[in-house]
Image: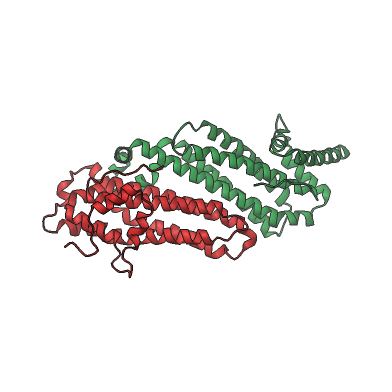
Chain colours: A red, B green
């Protein structure tokens, strides 16, 4: 359903590729949930879900650190940065857009709660094989709710937050943010998240990421 | 997915036939909404929803009045009634969402924006609700807002269907055994009659005819057999 990305107009557009991976893995989790029958174990679902959840939680944490209102304010004080308030005109439209951008962190909290609801169903019902059909339905329902909420969140982020960040960040700074999103410097395997994203992309899209020339070490 | 029901050990077991009919209708309703997530005319979905809503409301009302009301000192019976109320509430919420139209999917965003701005601009915000909605529509894009509304509607339909299935499962597991234990066959037939025949309607057979239409040939014969028993009891008491 998602069409292929063929160009990144700015480094921050790489986030759209990350979003594509998040959606794609969510669709895979939903498919596995649908196929989990009364006779089969839910292990395959748990593996796929754990992988998806790991990626989601990692990006939520990184985005909160790099793209929150506090981070935006810090951006405006960096040398050479453009003040967000200077760029925006006053009026209702500006206020609405700022509020939608600022709501990004709250969206992460809500999505994290929804992830936990899926885990509650998994952990609470997994031993009761006699109602496995009901468990499957509840899992499918929770995963659907989570995917739809994630769709809304990613759409809002692309509509309201990314444009604001593009306007306030230099290209080098954007590249640094994307590097920190795609390389987990606190992990013994810092490439895990880049590989996790790349698996869900087309070869052309992987080339786009490679073209950003993100290095494992900080550019600044 | 639904296995054929091959016997009715007691009159109240007709409930399994009715639940099967409901499940099949709900699945068609959900599939119709699934297909409309990207757009298109909703009239087929709303028609199915109205058919489902009329039947579930009749069914729940009849159960409350004739099946669970006589089961005093019974928590499963009270839970059953509470689940009916929850189903009705969720169905009502879906109706309300439908009535808001194509841009209902913006509801959460509008609320978030209004709540945040309210601190800043006080009473004129109520007048700006429409303006806030227009800003969001313009920024997100009308096509995307429509798709979002359709996704939200689909989720509500799925939630309703899962709630209904859970309810049927609970009823079959916890209430029907009580009915079999505490009610005589004649009493069970009376319950079945009220569930299948709407004596206040110009077409009293609208429910039983609909249930029949959702069943296999074998299941229709089971239902026909039960109907004969209902008629015999009615004749005896006439």
In this image, A131 relative to A15: left or right? right
**B110 or A176, nearer to the observer:** A176
State the quadrant of the C terminus of chain B. top right
Taking the spot 14% from the left edge, 54% from the top edge, the residue there is A81
**A62 or A82, nearer to the observer:** A62
Q: Residue furthest right?
A: B236
Residue A75, x across and y down, in percent: 18, 57
Q: Is residue B96 above or below residue A11?
A: above
In this image, B98 relative to A134: left or right? left
Taking the spot 41% from the left edge, 39% from the top edge, the residue there is B147
**B60 or A100, nearer to the observer:** A100
**A13 or B72, nearer to the observer:** A13
Q: Is residue A59 above or below residue B193?
A: below
Q: Is residue A46 above or below residue B50?
A: below
Judge whether residue B86 can be spotted in this image: no
Q: Quadrant of residue A54?
A: bottom left
Residue B153, x across and y down, in percent: 47, 42
Count the numbered circles shown.
Answer: 0
Residue A115, x across and y down, in percent: 44, 59
Judge whether residue A93 can be spotted in this image: yes
Residue A89, x across and y down, in percent: 18, 43
Q: Is residue A217 above or below residue B129?
A: below
Q: Residue furthest bottom?
A: A188
Q: Quadrant of residue A130?
A: bottom right
């Amino acid at each position: 359903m998602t069409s292929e990305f063929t160009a990144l107009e700015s480094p921050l557009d790489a986030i759209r590729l990350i979003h594509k991976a998040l959606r794609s893995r969510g669709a895979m989790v939903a498919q596995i949930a649908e196929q989990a029958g009364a006779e089969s174990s839910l292990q395959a679902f748990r593996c796929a879900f754990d992988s998806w959840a790991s990626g989601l939680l990692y990006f939520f944490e990184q985005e909160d650190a790099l793209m929150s209102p506090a981070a935006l304010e810090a951006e405006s004080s960096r040398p050479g940065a453009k003040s967000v308030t200077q760029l925006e005109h006053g009026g209702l439209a500006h206020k609405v857009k700022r509020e939608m951008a600022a709501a990004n962190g709250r969206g992460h909290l809500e999505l994290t709660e929804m992830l936990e609801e899926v885990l509650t169903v998994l952990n609470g019902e997994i031993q009761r094989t006699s109602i496995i059909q009901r468990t499957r339905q509840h899992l499918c329902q929770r995963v659907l709710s989570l995917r739809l909420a994630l769709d809304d969140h990613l759409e809002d982020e692309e509509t309201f937050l990314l444009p604001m960040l593009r306007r306030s960040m230099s290209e080098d700074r954007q590249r640094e943010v994307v590097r920190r999103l795609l390389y987990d410097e606190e992990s013994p395997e810092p490439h895990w998240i880049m590989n996790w994203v790349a698996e869900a992309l087309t070869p052309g899209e992987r080339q786009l990421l490679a073209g950003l020339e993100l290095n494992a070490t900080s550019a600044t | 997915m639904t296995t054929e029901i091959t016997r009715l050990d007691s009159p109240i077991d007709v409930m399994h036939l009715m639940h099967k009919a409901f499940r099949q209708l709900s699945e068609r309703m959900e599939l119709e909404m699934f297909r409309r997530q990207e757009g298109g005319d909703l009239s087929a979905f709303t028609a199915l929803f109205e058919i489902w809503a009329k039947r579930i409301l009749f069914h729940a009302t009849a159960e409350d009045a004739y099946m669970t009301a006589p089961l005093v000192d019974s928590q499963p019976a009270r839970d059953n009634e509470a689940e009916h109320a929850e189903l009705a509430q969720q169905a009502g919420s879906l109706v309300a969402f439908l009535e808001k139209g194509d841009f209902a999917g913006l509801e959460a965003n509008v609320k978030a924006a209004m709540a945040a701005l309210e601190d800043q601009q006080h009473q004129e915000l109520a007048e700006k609700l429409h303006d806030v909605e227009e800003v969001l529509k313009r920024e997100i894009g009308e096509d995307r807002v429509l798709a979002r509304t359709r996704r939200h509607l689909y989720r509500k339909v799925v939630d309703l269907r899962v709630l209904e299935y859970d309810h049927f499962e609970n009823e079959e597991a916890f209430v029907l055994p009580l009915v079999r234990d505490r009610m005589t066959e004649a009493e069970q037939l009376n319950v079945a009659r009220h569930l299948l025949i709407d004596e206040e309607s110009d077409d009293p057979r609208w429910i039983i005819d609909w249930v029949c239409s959702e069943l296999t040939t074998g299941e229709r014969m089971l239902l026909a057999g039960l109907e004969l028993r209902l008629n015999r009891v009615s004749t005896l008491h006439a």
